[in-house]
Amino acid sequence: MFTSQTSSFQDSIDVEERDDFDSEEIAGYSQKIQLNCYYTIYLYQGTRSEASGENVAWNQRRADSTTSQDDFSLTLIDSSLPSEAEPELRTYISRRLSKGALLGGMGNIATVELSIPEQAVGCYCCLLEQERSPEQPDADGNGYVICFMGGSEKGLNLYPLLELDKYVQGLHSSLQTPELQNLETEVRPYLSRWYEESVMHIYRVVQLVQSNISFLLHAALSHTLVELNNSDERTKADVSRFIKAASLQGLSQQDTTTASLCTAISEDTHCDLVIDCSISPPTLSNAVSNRFCDDWSQAFLNAAERCNPFLLRQILENFKLKAIQDMNSLKRFVRQAEMSHYALFRCFLFLQGCGNGDVLLQNARAEHSDLPEACSIIAVLEEFLKDQSQAQA
């Protein structure tokens, strides 16, 4: 069991060979970042809704950019797609709307084939409905359909839909009238930044700390607080999102894992990881890492050199998954060690081999705090690892 678990590390880290990203997709990224991303926004109107004279005139001016169905119309407001590709996207969105596949405020991701260099791209699509007036609560609603396109469907699916939904919701206050007089000043700039804000933050963090990324990974696993000094707000937000994305929250089989880690940290004496951004590259204080995080850091650096933010996200997900698998393996070993000294020895060998023993034992100690036999086994393992570390030093 120990051999199969430790040998799977290279399979986990070599995501280039996995089905998540095939070689053709990776080869499509040059050494310079290619922002092959697009956006489109449409006005969605129910045909039975009453429209003002201004709305009618505005729609007439856009007659060539409107697709009508029996119960709704879809009118182009703005798009960064090539002119030949936009009607193809509009036809696709119309079909989705006809089938009732777009629910208000809840986006979804699919693959669309358009007349663009990428041909097939991942497309996030969301319908933002306007509030209905109290006078006409049963009237067909109006709203906006917003589409973001970039990478592949598998690539976009690596980003939680809630993150993209939240970004779209940030535009809601700017979409008050169908004329959109603030198109140039607010709406278009906001839509144009979707890729930078929603996809590129992991890439920016790796570029910021470079080889020190292992310390951020360890901080995320161990729930160590990260403090940034002399940094702008965007960098602070990027690092915060990276730590949240790299943490184990939501991946554990038990809901108590995250809380247990936080409890374990609070019971010990730990210092915040401090990053000083006054110089480049930034300096780190109270930095702690381990062999597990050091090994994975090279995969992050390699993906950053490829300028592939989607590959970076895939590596991050694999990193978390491997940590969760090792945690579950340790739990099984601890249960077995309660009945077998040989299982205790195998548990020690596993902790030696995985390189993440400090984090795993920290979590296990918190989760088994009410089980005396398990706590005694964990204490023995901690003492073994401590002695080994001192001997190596």
Image: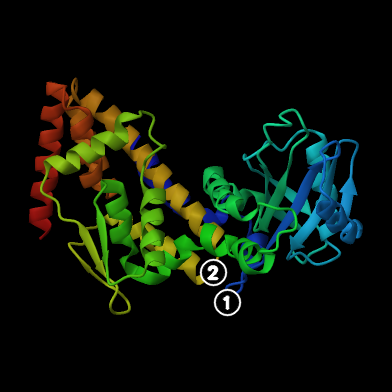
Residue 231, percent from left and from top: 32, 70
Residue 39, percent from left and from top: 69, 60
Q: Which residue is mark 2?
A: 307
At x 42% / y 43%, what residue is drawn? 321
Residue 207 in sight here: yes
Among the 4 quarters of the image, the one containing residue 202: bottom left
Q: Nearer the viewer, residue 189 or 381?
A: 189
* Quadrant in which the C terminus appears: bottom left
Residue 40, percent from left and from top: 72, 58
Label 2 to label 1, Cα distance in Å? 7 Å
Determine whether label 2 and label 1 are within 8 Å by CB: yes
At x 52% / y 48%, what residue is drawn? 163
* Mark 2 surroundings within 10 Å by alpha-carbon count, few (fewer than 14), some (14 through 19), many (20 or more): many
Q: Nearer the viewer, residue 266 or 197?
A: 197
- The three-letter code of the residue at mark 1 reads Lys
**Judging from the image, what secondary structure is the residue with disc 2 in?**
loop
In the displayed structure image, the side of residue 103 where residue 216 appears, left or right: left
**Judging from the image, what secondary structure is the residue with disc 1 in?**
loop
Mark number displayed over residue 79: none
Q: Nearer the viewer, residue 301 or 152?
A: 152
Mark number displayed over residue 32: 1
- The three-letter code of the residue at mark 2 reads Cys
* Mark 1 surroundings within 10 Å by alpha-carbon count, few (fewer than 14), some (14 through 19), many (20 or more): few
In the displayed structure image, the side of residue 217 where residue 35 appears, left or right: right
Residue 158, percent from left and from top: 55, 48
Residue 14 in sight here: no
* Quadrant in which the N terminus appears: top left
